[in-house]
Image (cartoon, rainbow, N blue to C red):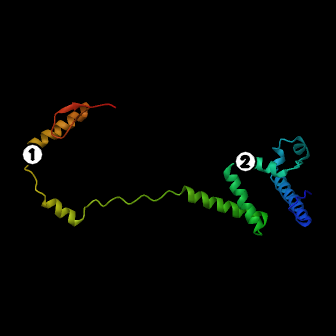
């Protein structure tokens, strides 16, 4: 029991009791998870239980190396157990919540509906009111053929109505 000058003897006793209780809890968790099988201390591996004076250090090292999904499962199971559920019920509840979280994370948003193929009546009226230049069908057919041939040959029109230029590669 360490006693600081700012503490009363009762506070120092409470702190020492708290540290002992916390070490017991950590050791119980470390033993339940069999962290001793990964421990760097030979005495832990040999004895099949935590012999480290600071079991919290073993637990911190183990949790640092544990995958995030396992950490989340363990937290959910411990929360369920502390809420009063039995071991099997806590396991089922933790797995159910993990599955729900996974489904929520992987659920793809629904794509937006495609835009309407027919424009509204106001747009149709505005388009119909535009003056159109007279069109020579033969000239238009020649332009279409020229563009098709140019596309096939790898060239393109640099600007509408201009001469063909070779395709640029970037």
How many callouts does the rendering have? 2
Between label 1 and label 2, give the one nearer the viewer. 2
Give the residue at x 7% y 45%.
136
Quadrant (top left/top right/bottom left/bottom right) for the C terminus: top left
Give the residue at x 85% y 53%.
31
Q: Residue 24 sits in which quadrant?
A: bottom right
Q: Which residue in the protein does label 1 denote?
A: 137
Packing grade of label 1 (10 A; few <14, some 14-19, many >=20) is: few
Residue occupying the far front of the picture: 5
The answer to whether residue 89 is visible is: no
Give the residue at x 24% y 65%.
120
Q: Which mark is residue 170?
A: none
93 left or right of 130 in image = right
- Residue 102 vertical position relative to residue 35 in the rendered view, above or below: below
- Where is residue 104 drawn, in percent x and y? 56, 60
Find out whether the residues at labels 1 and 2 contact each other: C-beta distance under 8 Å. no
Q: Which residue in the protein does label 2 denote?
A: 64
Among the two numbered marks 1 and 2 on one chain, the one whose residue lies closer to the N terminus = 2
132 left or right of 61 in image = left
- Residue 148 vertical position relative to residue 107 in the rendered view, above or below: above
Q: Residue 21 sits in which quadrant?
A: bottom right
- Where is residue 61 drawn, in percent x and y? 77, 47
Packing grade of label 2 (10 A; few <14, some 14-19, many >=20) is: few
- Where is residue 137 drawn, in percent x and y? 9, 45
């Amino acid at each position: 029991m360490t006693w600081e000058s700012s503490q009363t003897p009762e506070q120092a006793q409470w702190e020492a009791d708290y540290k002992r209780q916390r070490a017991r809890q950590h050791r119980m968790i470390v033993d339940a998870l069999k962290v001793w099988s990964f421990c760097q201390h030979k005495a832990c591996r040999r004895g099949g239980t935590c012999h480290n004076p600071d079991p919290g250090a073993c637990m911190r090292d183990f949790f640092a190396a544990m995958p995030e999904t396992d950490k989340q499962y363990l937290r959910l199971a411990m929360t369920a157990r502390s809420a009063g559920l039995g071991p099997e019920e806590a396991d089922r509840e933790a797995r159910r919540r993990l599955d729900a979280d996974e489904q929520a994370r992987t659920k793809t948003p629904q794509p937006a509906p495609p835009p309407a193929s027919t424009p509204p009546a106001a747009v149709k009226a505005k388009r119909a009111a535009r003056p159109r230049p007279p069109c020579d069908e033969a000239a238009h057919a020649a332009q279409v053929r020229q563009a098709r041939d140019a596309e096939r040959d790898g060239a393109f029109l640099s600007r509408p109505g201009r001469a063909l230029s070779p395709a640029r590669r970037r």
